Amino acid sequence: MTSNFNIEIEYKHVPRLDSGSEESIKYLDEYGYAVIKNALTSEEAKRTVDLLWDYLEDLGTGIDRKDPTTWGDDKWPTCAHGGIMPSYGIGHSEAQWYVRGIPNVKKAFAKIWDTEELLSSFDGVSLWRPWNINPDWKTESGQSWFHIDQHPISKPGKHCVQGLVNLLPTTDKIGGNVVIPRSHKFFENIPNEYKERLSRLPLDIDHFRFPNDDPKLTSEKAVMCHMEPGDLLLWDSRTIHCSNSGSELEDGTNSLIRAASLICMMPKHLTSEDVLEKRREAVDKLISTTNWTNGFRNADEFPIILEAKDRDKYKWPEKPVLNEYQKSLID
Ligand SMILES: O=C(O)CCC(=O)C(=O)O
Ligand SMILES: [Fe+2]
């Protein structure tokens, strides 16, 4: 697949590995990403999409899942880069807690960290609207935001593996997540390469963007993985990645083209009592976070959210009703 920028992306059927398998760990270590087959069944993926629509309709802005004319920015929740919804209670929506409550998801992370004692992030979702209806709904192309999600100076080494559960069929035309295979291996040298750029990045900001002409972006062909609904994409936070919207949609497309639930689990023992306390409060107050479970970053305070117009118009979800398994992922 060629896009409207000079980094070629290959839409690829990569191995779909079993959750918790040795192969998944080997693949992740070697390539910096891995696809886990059916972390959710296709029925569970469908249920999650239904729950996401419940969330959107319950915001009370007039969104109707059956009527794309009601999906405009005046009603849709504020999105960050790549169509990610980070706030307005999404991190504690029934949909997100439903995904976290599926043991096959945790199984993938438990094998990575060799422990069942894991905490879950409270992050959001990426939802892409059919931009053939409104071109403004098209999300960013990869070239503008290839990044890593780990500070190269304050967090040397392996710290975090991020995840997204894909909920709808993928195609090269729709687009999706893009990773540069093996690019996590460049991480160690980034402080030497980007002294000046890094001097401007606060040590607690785990997001570093690469200039378009960085040779690492073309060190291997960028890969967009084919995924079935329910598949989980894992990537090391040191792996260079982004999402990239596709170039065309079939005429008459009038449903969501991409839905991905962001989910990350990390070992409990890394988390201080102070952060655990903030996490308990986050569930109580419906505060969404980023992927990190051992540090606390309130996604409701992202500048794009604080700057959003009429943000009082959204009715936030009810406090989640959680079972013991889901509660164990809080603290
Ligand atoms: O939507 C995507 O696939 C990209 C998400 C991303 O960059 C992230 O969650 O760190
Ligand atoms: Fe990212």
Image (cartoon, rainbow, N blue to C red):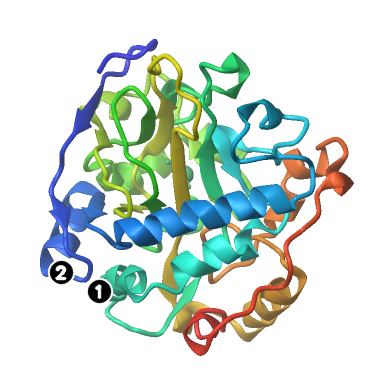
User: Which residue position is annotated with label 1?
Assistant: 111
Total numbered circles: 2
What residue is shown at x 44% (from left), y 33% (from top)? 257
Residue 195: percent from left, percent from top: 49, 37
Q: Which of these two is toward me, 101 or 162?
A: 101
Residue at 24 percent of width and 52 percent of height: 35
Q: CA distance from mark 1 to mark 2?
A: 7 Å
Q: In the rendering, at what x and y percent does residue 184 appear?
A: 29, 47
Q: Is residue 184 left or right of residue 211?
A: left
Give the percent coordinates (x, y) of residue 164.
40, 52
Tell me if residue 283 can be seen.
yes
Residue furthest out toward the bottom = 324
* Nearer-N-terminus badge (1/2): 2
| Ligand 1 closer than 8 Å to label 1 CB | no
Q: Which residue is mark 2?
A: 21
Question: Which residue appears farthest toward the front when viewing the image?
Answer: 66
The x and y percentages for residue 290 are 58, 57
Q: Residues within 10 Å of mark 1 (few under 14, many from 20)?
A: some
Q: Quarter of the image holding residue 250?
A: top left
Q: Amino acid at mark 1?
A: Lys
Side of 327 where 16 appears, left or right: left
Question: What's the residue at 56%, 84% (across, down)?
Answer: 331
Residue type, label 2: Ser
Q: Residues within 10 Å of mark 2 (few under 14, many from 20)?
A: some
Ligand 1 closer than 8 Å to label 2 CB = no
